[in-house]
Image: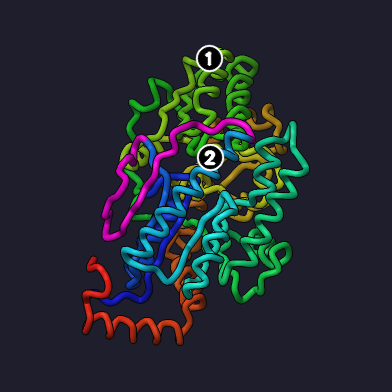
Amino acid sequence: MKEYAGRVLMIVQNLPVPFDRRVWLEAKTLRDHGYRVAVISPKSKEFSSSYEYLDDIHVYRYSIPFEAFGFWGYFLEFVYAWIRTAILTAKIYIWHGFDVIHACNPPDTFFLLGRIYRLLGVRFIFDHHDLSPEMYQAKFADRPNQWVLKTLLLLEKLTFATADVVLATNQSYKSVAIERGLKHASNVFVVRTGPDLHRLEQRKPRPELKRTKPYMVCYLGEMCPQDGVEYLLDSIRILVYDLGVKNVHFCLIGGGPSFADLQALSHQMQLNEVVEFTGRISDDLLCDYLSTADICVDPDPYSEWANHSTMNKVMEYMTFAKPIVSFDLYETKLTASKAALYVSANDTRAFAKGILNLVQDPQRCKQMGAFGRQRVLSTLSWQHSVPSLLRAYKTVLGREENKVYGEIKKLDRKHSFLMPHD
């Protein structure tokens, strides 16, 4: 039987694996450093298998038979997904066992599994992807329910209390874990979702992707109510109909619950001739689009969630040496620095003028892009996050636990019938 540094079960509900870039990078990194890794995630059209042994990682998926809309829709989705996850967790524990549950949010409900399996000696890592209370406020800004908000804060508190170790995506999230979650700083590790330079490679531009226009502006990311794509569409409307800009093609890459509504809004704004919705695309085609783009955009409007979150799209733009237009957000400025042009929060006219300013200044675009690319190479790429992830696992398992696990493995070699073989 193969020896492992530890056995890890990763749980994610928000996105399927391997589409969830952060989870897949973590899983592959742990695999490369001697851990046996299994992942539970939902299915999607692109990833519909219930089980795959993918890149030496066990991937278990479940289907969600309905699309969530509104508060009750999301609530039912969370409950259903939690039950399906709990069933798979029990099966995986019986089949293979695990020493660590590595749970990603949202939602902040998997602490219950952490508490159950703690009785069997399993450790719990909370991978803090999103500020759930602040995300709720951003999604339902026009009709927030204070009881829901208080419930989300309670669930977050219980998750932090259960976690042996917390993985924070940036310093703002680390501060939340310490101040709101009451975690000791030594048990909170900043693991940025840095770009994978093996996946994202610069290529020769493909001019045909610009649809006969001399310039192309790209958006990459999920299309949810809080992501601000409607702000981008309004900015494009201003550029085309108020400022008379006719030489730019806009490419919006990604999918999500708001995808159809945004397509309808684009049609309503009479932007069909200048706006392309690609949906979710392969990594190969993504590299072509981002290598061809002249400018990239992050239209996330100001909210407490957006202000303190690191947007993966920003670092991916920087990987391709692209200048960025963004609203003025705290963590975005810390990440992109001089690689982005910042405009007043939620001001679509200012956003439109920012795009126009960069279109008219190719030399500035070149300098901004080069700065961003170098910042990724020197500071932000995934390889710079790996040491912190491994330190977190060393902390959660500890030397004594590793020693005990090694003794168990010696026993397994003598009595291999005790556990199923991989």
Can you identify the residue that label 2 sits on? Answer: 77
| 223 part of magenta stretch | no
Residue 16 showing in the rendered view: yes
Asked if the magenta segment contains residue 58, the reply would be yes
Looking at the image, which residue is at 57% across and 72% down? 164
Task: State the extent of the magenta-drawn residues as a range.
Answer: 45-71
Q: Residue at x 50, y 59 (%)?
A: 103
Sooner in the amino-acid sequence: mark 2 or mark 1? 2
Is label 2 in a helix, a strand or a loop? helix
Classify residue 157 by image quadrant.
bottom right
Whether residue 9 sits left or right of residue 34 in the image: it is right
Amino acid tagged 1: His
> Which quadrant of the figure contains the N terminus?
bottom left
Q: Which residue is mark 1?
A: 267
Confirm or deny contact between disc 2 and disc 1 (CB under 8 A).
Answer: no
| Whether residue 33 is situated above or below residue 269 in the rendered picture | below
Residue 119 image point, x, y percent: 51, 72
Q: Can you say which quadrant of the picture contains the C terminus?
A: bottom left
> Which of the 4 quarters of the picture holds residue 285?
top left
Q: Secondary structure at mark 1?
A: helix
Residue 26: x %, y % from top left:
42, 61
Badge 2 local density, few (<14 within 10 Å), some, or many (20+)? some
Q: Name which residue type carries label 2.
A: Glu
Badge 1 crowding class, 10 Å Cα cut-off, few under 14, some 14 to 19, many 20 or more, is: few
Residue for point 42% across, 44% down: 42
Q: Tell which tag, 2 or 1, sits nearer the viewer.
A: 2
Separation of residues labelled 2 and 1 (CA atoms):
30 Å
Q: Pinpoint residue 265: horizontal percent, then vertical percent.
A: 57, 19
Q: Position of residue 180 (x, y in %)?
A: 72, 62
Nearer-the-camera pick, 83 or 128: 83
